[in-house]
Image (cartoon, grey):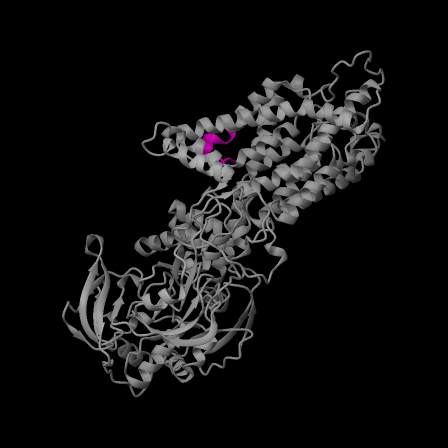
Amino acid sequence: MKILHDFLESVKPNFQKGGKLEKWHPVFEAFETLAFVPADTTKDGVHIKDAMDMKRTMATVIIALVPCMLFGMWNVGNQHYLAFGMEADLMEKFMFGFWKVLPIIVVSYAVGLGVEFVFSVMAGHAISEGYLVTGLLIPLTLPVTVPLWMVALGAVFCTLLGKEIFGGTGFNFMNPALLARAFMFFAFPAFMSGDIWTDLSPEQGQTVLDAFSGATNLVAFDTNYVTMQSASDMFFGFEQGSIGETSVFAVLIGAALLIVTGVGSLRIMLSVFVGGLVMGFIMNALAPDAANHAMHMPAINHLLVGGFAFGAVFMATDPVTASHTAKGKIIYGLAIGAFTVILRVFNPAYPEGMMLSILLFNVFAPLIDHMVVEQHIKKRLKHA
Amino acid sequence: MGKSIRLKKGYDIKLIGEASKEIINIPSAEIFAVKPTDFLNMTPKMVVKVGDEVLAGDALFFDKKRPEINFPSPVSGEIVEILRGAKRKILEVRILADKEIKFKKVAIPFKLDADSVKETLLQANLWSLLRQRPFSIIPNTADSPKAIFVSTFDSAPLAPDLSFVIEQNKSSFDKGLEVLSALSSGHLNVGLSANSSLSVSTGNATGFSGPHPAGNVGIQIHHTDAIKPGETVWYVDTQDVVVLGKLFNTGEYHADRIIALTGSEVNNPRYFNAKVGQSLTGILSESVTSENVRYIQGNVLTGALSHKEDYLSAYTSQMTIIPEGNKAEFLGWLLPSTKKLSLSRTYFSWLMPNKKYTIDTNTHGEERPFVVSGQYEKVLPMNIMPVQLLKAILAGDIERMEALGIYEISEEDFALCEFVCASKIEVQKLVRQGLDLMLSEG
């Protein structure tokens, strides 16, 4: 480590004031602080600081996402071989998915961080760690057949217009990963819905089974919900869908890490689940007589199907774009869960509601906070 | 004891280097230095000049804006130097102390009531023993506070055991409380630690239990009788209550304090007797051997930056000496470690709640905008929304700052928020900025 540290110290003067590469200081600093916690000491104020910082917060979220990523890679292979009716073992399925998913992750990080580097050099401010998480979230929300150039465009859109334009991490008001996804959905709808969930790269000597259907459980939900897969399949994730969202089990492992470390808000996660469940029960109660109407689906299944669990744990809990007050988080979470169910049930043109629901309540989060703070102020004035 | 209040929010930082309960005397160096910079929002104008002889308690300088408030000399002797800094700002008034201290004597009033106490304090040049909330400045002499508060325990990291300190001068302390009760016309509130056996002769005693900042006077004020806009409360440091007591018993200013010498870099952490303004060079050089350390007058959260040849400040009860953290650490933000302290559960300190740590001054990361939410609220036991208030300060929105409670806060109450902040925001600096804005505009 001394060698690395000495190397960085020797190169540093080039990037400091008066050096040749002074403009690129934020980029140098980003790599230097990634390798080493800087030797900065406290100046005004407290003399000691908590050992946790933004990097560790983001690193914890990335670790929490690993189960979803690993399962997603395996599932890509799983769905592929199922479509062809082929037998394959765990390693074969995983490696198939690994080589399909890895390029998407690499492109997402490279392009997004590239935009951040350019912006930091232009604006002269430090590169923040926010994209470390967004860069992994974006691929996990995409179908595996997504073209790489589209991933790049999505990354550019969300980083540039979703974050940097407002001042960077901490100043954005909408979840960047979901913005990327929404952009790709509305700009390239043919690539985001339909028979695009399973990778059907040709296998020598094999043809896709006749019985193969490219429809996900959410599509089945809209048309005839009894044809959805079993709750167990949906819980463990043996279904088609975006790369990282299918396994509620993997999501819950990540959620456990986020809750134990205190990095993810349990309040928001629980509120989203409760909101969805309650609205599901209301739907059940108000369902019309037609036996296969979507409103009849057991409320608990709403939490298992599609991107609900993934969104509740990793997207809705983004601390910058969620409500900041404790009461606000509960209202925000309940609203997201309930609204997702409403969107799913009543909108035939768009099976998934989670993404749009979260984005909508990202916009409302400051208003929810404002109401909570006004209530707090009124209570304080009453004592005066 | 009267009410008992249990506070849940806060955080006890357990550090190595607690002072053992022995008090030593340090050889009294010849030069004493009084620092006008100890007093907030105060521009001094000199009363004495180089060469003048003073008695202990004589005025050295006064507040330019309020000339009736004078600041006393802790010892008798000759003024040898007036140290000035940039723009001729007075930094230190240096006095060559007599071997035997000669005291100025003030008349002790027969009856103790608000007016006679005020008069005596001003005569004795000891008005600066009082401070007020809001703003933590020395109060105006014409004001009448809603109440006077004294906190008899300090919950900050490695803080001195104030009960131990009070024990050494119990009768003076009791007299001091009597004086304060008269000054406040009967509205004296004393905050006690719930598990202390201290008996309080005068005033309304309230017991507080819970983690730091339960010992902060601002927190105690908030939970006993919160400040409403327009109100002021005064507060006095425990050791200054003893000084008050001695003044009203003898008519003399005895600037003695008992200081806790603490911190992981101190060879033998214990207490020592010192006067305000005393040179600390001797005790520090014999107690601290490492070079790369930070000297702090006060505790690690709110203390002032000091150095090894400093002089004791007016309100100091503790010195903390910790290692400087000016070394880079490879992947320090990612790797697990049992040596690091964090309120969060991303390290292991939450599993070992009684472990004591050696913490250095490393910031553990760079400054970022506000990202995570809910952290500050965990360590602020007040009915105040800290982040919203700080944002109002950043925006300079005076009405909003008032509505959110700027008058009730002080930097020391927000010190833990600054400690836990993952974005490394300079919270206490922001709080002072907000308070200064309210002082000038509000």
Indicate the position of residue B54 as horizontal and vertical percent values. Answer: 19, 75
Indicate the position of residue B147 as horizontal and vertical percent values. Answer: 40, 72
Residue positioned most to the front: A3
Quarter of the image holding residue A218? top right
Residue positioned most to the bottom: B110
A184 in relation to A33, above or below = above
Magenta-drawn stretch, dominant element (helix, strand or loop): loop
Residue A319 visible at all: no
Whether the magenta-drawn stretch holds residue A41 is answered as: no
A202 in relation to B179, above or below = above
- Give the magenta range: A161-173
Indicate the position of residue B360 as horizontal and vertical percent values. Answer: 46, 54
Please name whichever residue, B196 or A162, is drawn nearer the observer in this view of the structure. B196
Quarter of the image holding residue B217? bottom left
A283 in relation to B236, above or below = above
A118 in relation to B194, above or below = above
Quarter of the image holding residue B45? bottom left
> A61 left or right of B391?
right
Please name whichever residue, A192 or A145, is drawn nearer the observer in this view of the structure. A145
| Residue at point 76%, 24% (across, down) | A77
Residue B279 visible at all: yes
| Residue at point 67%, 33% (across, down) | A354
- Count of all numbered marks drawn on residues in the image: 0
Please name whichever residue, A3 or B41, is drawn nearer the observer in this view of the structure. A3
Whether the magenta-drawn stretch holds residue A163 is answered as: yes
Please name whichever residue, A204 or B177, is drawn nearer the observer in this view of the structure. A204
Indicate the position of residue B370 as horizontal and vertical percent values. Answer: 48, 44
> A85 left or right of B314?
right
